[in-house]
């Protein structure tokens, strides 16, 4: 069996970086102590910003979940195997996306 210690290290670093990014996003969203904008257009912009930040936050949270799953799979010795078909995930794909849980064929079939 392959040694995925290095991959695990990379994943842990990604987690840390994402954690920092998430904290920053959460900080940006939390502006409830500020007075409500009087200008209507400004308010709309504010709402739009919140939506973008919300989206970024959700994307980052989804990524965190995937990375954590990948780390669990390394610990269980299942890393590098497709969750759908059980086949091996190609190394190039894992290099590009270390937390990939599906092989390229299955990832193409299942909409995310
Ligand atoms: Zn597959």
Image (cartoon, helix red, strand yellow):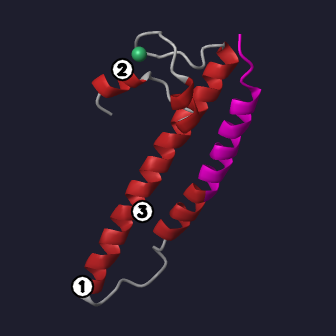
Q: Position of residue 41 (x, y in %)?
A: 24, 85
Q: Which image quarter: residue 94?
A: top right
Q: Which residue is at 42% across, 85% downward?
A: 35
Q: Which image quarter: residue 103?
A: top left
Which circle, 3 or 2, is nearer the viewer? 2
Mark number displayed over residue 41: 1
Q: Position of residue 101 (x, y in %)?
A: 49, 25
Q: Give the quadrant of ligand 1.
A: top left
Sequence-first disc among 1 and 3? 1
Mark 3 Cα shell of 10 Å, populated few (<14), some (14-19), many (≥20): some
Q: Eyeballing the image, is 29 above or below 43? A: above
Label 1 vs label 2: CA separation? 45 Å
Q: Position of residue 4 (x, y in %)?
A: 71, 24
Residue 25 covered by magenta stretch: no
Which quadrant would the C terminus be assigned to in this image? top left
Label 3 vs label 2: CA separation? 30 Å
Secondary structure beneath label 3: helix
Mark 2 Cα shell of 10 Å, populated few (<14), some (14-19), many (≥20): some
Q: Eyeballing the image, is 99 above or below 15? A: above
Q: Which residue is at 59% across, 51% downward?
A: 18
Mark 3 lies on residue: 53
Mark 2 lies on residue: 106
Label 2 residue near ligand 1, CB within 8 Å: yes
Q: Is residue 9 left or right of residue 46?
A: right
Q: Which residue is at 58% across, 58% downward?
A: 21
Mark 1 Cα shell of 10 Å, populated few (<14), some (14-19), many (≥20): few
Sequence-first disc among 1 and 2? 1
Range of residues picked out in magenta: 1-20
């Amino acid at each position: 069996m392959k040694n995925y210690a290095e991959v695990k290290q990379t994943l842990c670093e990604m987690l840390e970086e994402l954690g920092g990014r998430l904290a920053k996003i959460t900080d940006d969203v939390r502006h409830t102590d500020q007075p409500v904008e009087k200008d209507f257009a400004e308010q709309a912009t504010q709402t739009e910003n919140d939506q973008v930040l919300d989206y970024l936050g959700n994307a980052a949270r989804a990524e965190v979940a995937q990375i954590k799953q990948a780390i669990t799979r390394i610990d269980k010795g299942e890393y590098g195997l497709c969750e759908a078909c059980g086949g091996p995930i190609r190394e190039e794909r894992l290099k590009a996306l270390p937390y990939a849980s599906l092989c390229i064929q299955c990832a193409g079939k299942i909409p995310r």
